[in-house]
Image: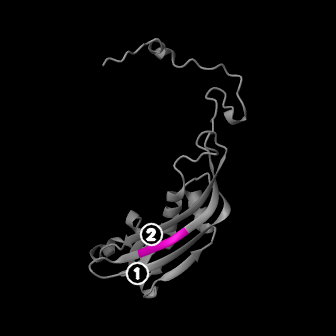
Amino acid sequence: MWIALADLPADGASIEFTDPAIWAEPMKEFGMACRVLKPLIARMTILAQQGDGVDGCLFRGTLKGEVALPCNRCAEDAIVTIDSTFDTFEPFPPEAGAAAFTADSDAPDELVTRREKGVPQINPEALLWEEFVLALPVKPLCRPDCKGLCPSCGHNKNYGDCDCAAGSGDPRLAVLRSLKLSKKS
């Protein structure tokens, strides 16, 4: 969804994004094991910034919803409530480099802003995807005290202990278990 800067009102534009495809298509493209439980809704104000040698857009908004991700320890569903705000500025590519930024270009700088035939354009959906990914936890957990899986049999330790023998650790480090350290003043 590319919007030309000239199409934005002088006082900015407020847009609400509720289309599930905004999230579903990138999740599929990036192979994310993520399910939307409560619809992801984004509200964004876009303000064009021009002058003083800096052209771009200021994006302010919120992103709310709920998703399920695999727990980092046991792979069960980790429910993540997303309630984030963002305030970011995205500059446009310089006018001199406008020829390098075409609709067919895969330049990374073109994800949010570009120039098409010299006209600055923005893609708010790309920015929303970035904000969504930033709102996700690095290591989602199904619960704070998740015990994970048994490394031998794969049993989920949150449901009880398995029949595997308690490991005595790496046998190559057995000599270190009897090591006594004394503290000298």
Q: Position of residue 173 (x, y in %)?
A: 46, 16
Look at the image and give the residue range highlighted in magenta. Answer: 58-62
Q: Relative to 142, does residue 81 appear above or below in the rendering?
A: below
Query: Is 38 on the left or on the right of 168, as rendered?
Result: right
Residue indicated by mark 1: 48
Dot 1 and dot 2 residues touching (CB under 8 Å): no
At horizontal 49% and vertical 82% (from top left) the residue drawn is 13
Which one is in front, 164 or 110? 164
Q: CA distance from mark 1 to mark 2?
A: 13 Å
Asked if residue 82 is among those painted magenta in the image, a careful observer would answer: no
Total numbered labels placed on residues in the image: 2
* Mark 1: few/some/many CA within 10 Å (<14, 14-19, 20+): many
Which of the two discs, 1 and 2, sits closer to the camera?
2
- Describe the colour scheme in one phrase: one colour
Q: Position of residue 82 (x, y in %)?
A: 59, 60
Residue 2 in sight here? no
Q: Position of residue 34 (x, y in %)?
A: 62, 54
Residue indicated by mark 2: 87
At horizontal 46% and vertical 83% (from top left) the residue drawn is 12
Query: Is 49 on the left or on the right of 149, as rendered?
Result: left
Dominant secondary-structure state across the stretch colored magenta: strand
